[in-house]
Image: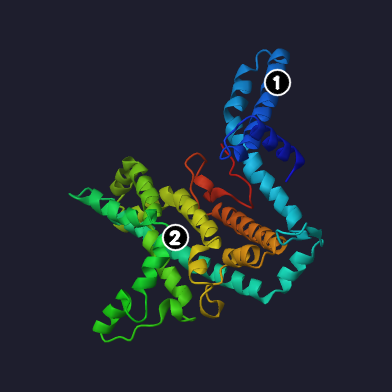
Amino acid sequence: MNPTIGWIRTLAESWGVPAVLVPLVPFLVLLIVLYAVIGLAAYGAKRKWPRADKTIAFWLFISPWLIGFLVFTVGPMLSSVYVSLTSWDLITPPRYVGLANYTEAFQDPRVGQAIKVTLLYAVISVPLQTFLAFLVALLMNVDLPGIRFFRTVWYLPSLVSGVAQIVLFLWVFNPQYGLANDLLGKLGVQGPGWFFDASWALPTVILMSLWTVGGAMVIYLAGLKDVPLNLYEAAALDGAGPLRLFWHVTLPQLSPIILFNALTGIIGALQIFTQGFVANGGPKDSLLFFVYYLYDNAFQNFRMGYASALAWILFVIILALTAVTLRGSAFAVYYETELGGRRRLRAGRPARRN
């Protein structure tokens, strides 16, 4: 324990602070010190720049979030950079090993398997989820009696936690007494082993992921409600049919939302964990997702340095795929705030305005 934190806790105990609250005292002291520094800085800035009241108020109002972001996000990230360069088992002090963890990761066959499984899951599941959510949103975008009930039914599964989902589908896809194989048996079809078969485990998880498209469906539905009706009316006057209305009006107007759902879907798919954890990696590492392998090294094998290196490798992969997706979207996404949308971008340069 840090000597300063130990001294603060001892002081709190001597003052009669309840034992349950003692661990919180150093954190509260840190907050008080930070706000004292911010207050003094704001007071000094106000004296030096009397007209900067709005700027000072802005920084004061965002300071709770900013402090939390620096302490609980940036701080641990920077700490993990150092940990990734060490060999640390959480018990003995960290031992600096340089880039040895990264070298081992590039030579570890299970890292290759984890990347393969995770990328395969993302490449298949994200387009399927995007397409299905968009299709359901189109079906739900009608004014019929009881349509709100069906929208709610489609959305509710997205509220179920990951562990509850996997437990439910372990029963649905159980090869002996599961609901899926029971229905297939009544049709005269021999059901597969699903989660318990190495060749079917990943397709089963992909199929399971389609159950929670309700969240993306709601976003698409909001976008469909926001498409100006005058665009449809003008296109209809020009003789456009349903397919042309969809292709030339609906799709361009929803392209930013499609990009958003696809991007968040990719990021989420690359961080999938629960299914691999509950299935213990699946048969023959068929569900060895990258984050699960990271967790296994960190909290099962107590190799925090190696796990931190894996975390940064995953960060770079997600960052690269996000950048490629955003770059490629410049030629396919329409924004009303830009002249002609972003379709007119050439060689990465914005369109000229007349």
Q: Quadrant of residue 105?
A: bottom right
* Residue 215, horizontal then vertical, whole percent: 39, 53
The alpha-carbon separation of the residues under discs 2 and 1 comes to 46 Å
* Residue 87, horizontal then vertical, whole percent: 76, 62
In the rendered view, how is the structure colored? rainbow
Q: Residue at x 39, y 83 (%)?
A: 192
Left or right, residue 277 beside residue 229: right
* Residue 98, horizontal then vertical, whole percent: 82, 61
Can you see residue 241? no
Q: Label 2 belongs to which residue? A: 162
- Which residue type carries mark 2? Gly
Q: Is residue 205 above or below residue 67?
A: below
Q: Residues within 10 Å of mark 1 (few under 14, many from 20)?
A: few
Q: Label 1 belongs to which residue? A: 40
Quadrant including the C terminus: top right
Q: Quadrant of residue 71?
A: top right
Of label 2 and label 1, which has the lower sequence position?
1
Left or right, residue 288 beside residue 232: right
Left or right, residue 115 beside residue 170: right
Which residue is at the front of the view, 272 or 128? 272
- Which residue type carries mark 1? Leu
The dot on residue 312 is none
Can you see residue 199? yes
Q: Is residue 341 above or below residue 114?
A: above
Q: Classify mark 1: helix, strand or loop.
A: helix
